[in-house]
Image: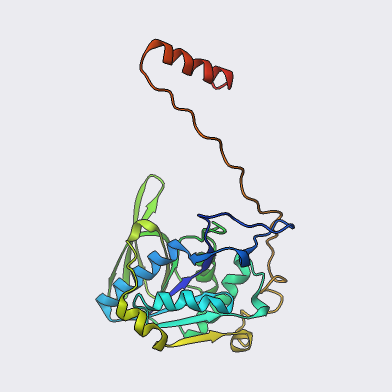
Amino acid sequence: MKIIVCVKQVPDTSGKVAVNPDGTLNRASMATITNPDDLNAVEAALQLKEQTGAEVIVISMGPPPAEGMLREIQARGVDRAVLVSGREFGGSDTYATSQILAAAINKLGVEKDDVILCGRQAIDGDTAQVGPQIAEKLGLPQVSYAAEITKDGDTITVKRMLEDGYMTIKVKTPCLITCIKELNTPRYMSVGGVFDCYSKPYEIFDYETLKDDPLIDPSTIGLKGSPTNIFKSFTPPQKGVGMMLEGADRATCDKLAGLLAAKHLI
């Protein structure tokens, strides 16, 4: 049994977001982190590995420096890492990215008991599209927004979070599941894991490696194969400091009412 986890290296949006003059993100000048929801997917995979003895493979599409992120994830207990990287893949939107990742997963092979895990969404795009699109392109059943995962043989029971409650779904493997932060608390790297991570299998899938897959068509990957156009990215203006009124007397209430009336809120 394999558990394949899709992860993404994203800009650290807790700091200042750098924007190029054309409105696109200046990723080269920004610190990067592993997408938070993807770490919940990694933790879910490691917990399933402890229960079933499965092999855990983490896969990411990005530039060569993403190796550092993948090695850190291997230090948490992941067995293998695959970086999908090539100039032909640059500029891909969610549609093209899912094409490429689906082809890479085909290269790894999807068997009867296998599970593919993804984070719910990436903090740089917030689309929540790549995971479901991968499932569609691989012809696999999918369950999104997983808050609890239980495996029993070739059946997985998922407690799926909704806006107003939960839904319990049973699905047969192979399948794809997207994970939310409420699913678990990701573990840290261990000292032994840090020592061992660079001796674990690490592969690079470039265009030449994947070009024979039917999903890899120059017209549907990279910038050329991306139907999404980003008009502009920008940092929202900082909000002013809030005003605090202390006291429970009539004068304070009158002052609050006056301030709200001045802003036409009442």
Q: In this view, does 174 lie to the left or right of 137?
A: left
Q: Quadrant of residue 18?
A: bottom right
Q: Position of residue 32 (x, y in %)?
A: 52, 66
Q: In this view, does 169 lie to the left or right of 121?
A: left
Q: Quadrant of residue 62?
A: bottom right
Quadrant occupied by the N terminus:
bottom left
Q: Is residue 263 or residue 231 the one in the foreground? A: 263
Residue pictured at 74% horizontal, 57% vertical: 21
In this view, 218 is above or below 23: below
Residue 133 appears in the figure: yes
For this rendering, which residue is in front, 200 or 154? 200
- In the rendered view, does 17 fall on the left or right side of 69? right
Against 262, is 103 above or below?
Answer: below
Q: Position of residue 61 (x, y in %)?
A: 55, 75
Q: Quadrant of residue 251?
A: top left
The answer to whether residue 1 of the structure is visible from this angle is no
Q: Is residue 218 above or below residue 142?
A: below
Position of residue 140 measured from the top left corner of the image (x, y, whole percent): 47, 72
Q: Which residue is drawn at 47% across and 85% down?
A: 108
In this rendered view, identify the residue nearer to me: 53 or 12.
Answer: 12
Q: Residue at x 46, y 12 (%)?
A: 254
Q: How is the image coloured?
A: rainbow
Q: How many marks?
A: 0
Residue 24 is situated, as x and y percent measured from the top left of the image, at 68, 59
In the rendered image, the residue lying farthest to the top is: 250
